[in-house]
Image: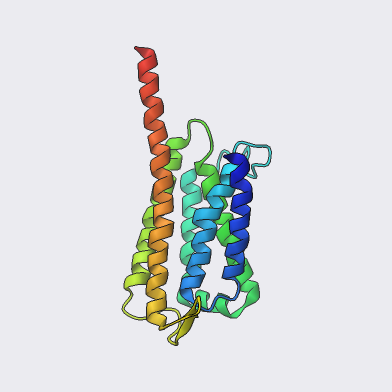
Amino acid sequence: MRTIALPAGLALLGLALVLGLGAGSFTVHMVAHMGMVAVAAPLIACGLVGTRRDPLAGLAWMTPMLASLVELVVVWFWHVPVLRAAADASLVLTLVEQASFLAAGLLLWITCLRPGDGRLAGTIGLLFTSMHMTLLGVLLALAPRPLYGDGAVSCFGIPLSAAADQQIGGVVMLMVGALAYLAGGVTLLAGLLRDGEEKMVEER
C-alpha cells in the first residue's frame, strides 16, 4: 500500500497543480484545492509517515490539533475574497497559495497518521478539519451573492455565472474535502476501537 500510495499521490499532486494554475473558475480552483489537500496529501502522507523520509520525524510538538488549526488558517485565509482575487491575478501568488495548501495538507495528514498512541489525537484533528471544511463549503454554497467576481466563467468548458460557479465550488468542498477528512477520522477511530477490543480479549 505504501509503495503505491506515494507515486499515486505525487501524480495526483501534479494534476492538481496544473489545474490550479491560472484557473479562472472557482469550481476548477476548488477541484484543484481538494485534489491537493484531501486526495494527494493523504496518499503522500501514507507513503512517508513512519519512514526515514518523513519530514516531521522527531517533531513531537507538532500535534494533530495544532496542524488542523494551521490548515484552518491557511484555507480560510486564501478564501477571503480580496486574497482570492489577488491570487487569481498573479502567478506568483497562485504558486504561494498552492504551496501553502500542500504544506498545510501534508502537515495535517502526516501528524494524524503517525503510528503509535497518537491515533486518538489524529482522529480529533481530522474530524475538526472536516467540521471547518463543512462550514466553509456551506458558506460558499449558500452565500446570497457571488464573492469571487460577477462575470460569467468557463468551468471545464461549460459557461457558468459567477454565482453558480461559486455554489458548485462550495459543494465540491463539501463532497470531497469534508468527506475525506471525516472518512480519515472514522477510519482512525475504528482502528482504535478494534485495538481496544483485542486488548480486552487478551486480558481475559
Apparent side of residue 33 relative to residue 170 in the rendered image (left or right)? right
Q: How is the image coloured?
A: rainbow
Where residue 85 sits in the image (x, y, percent)?
Answer: 52, 79
Q: Is residue 2 visible?
A: yes
Where residue 161 sits in the image (x, y, percent)?
Answer: 40, 83
- Count the marks: 0
The answer to which of 69 and 106 lies nearer the viewer is: 106
Apparent side of residue 40 relative to residue 195 in the rendered image (left or right)? right
The quarter of the image holding the N terminus is: top right
Where residue 13 sits in the image (x, y, percent)?
Answer: 60, 58
Q: Is residue 71 above or below residue 156?
A: above
The quarter of the image holding the C terminus is: top left
Task: Find the residue positioned furthest to the top.
Answer: 204
Where residue 55 sits in the image (x, y, percent)?
Answer: 65, 45
Q: What residue is drawn where x is 55% and y is 54%? A: 40
Q: Splitting the image into 4 quarters, where does residue 123 fall?
A: top left
Q: Is residue 20 above or below residue 39?
A: below
Q: Is residue 48 visible?
A: no
Q: What residue is drawn where x is 45% and y is 86%? A: 152
Q: What residue is drawn where x is 40% and y is 56%? A: 178
Task: Find the residue positioned furthest to the bottom.
Answer: 151
Task: Find the residue positioned furthest to the front.
Answer: 157
Q: What residue is drawn where x is 37% and y is 73%? A: 167
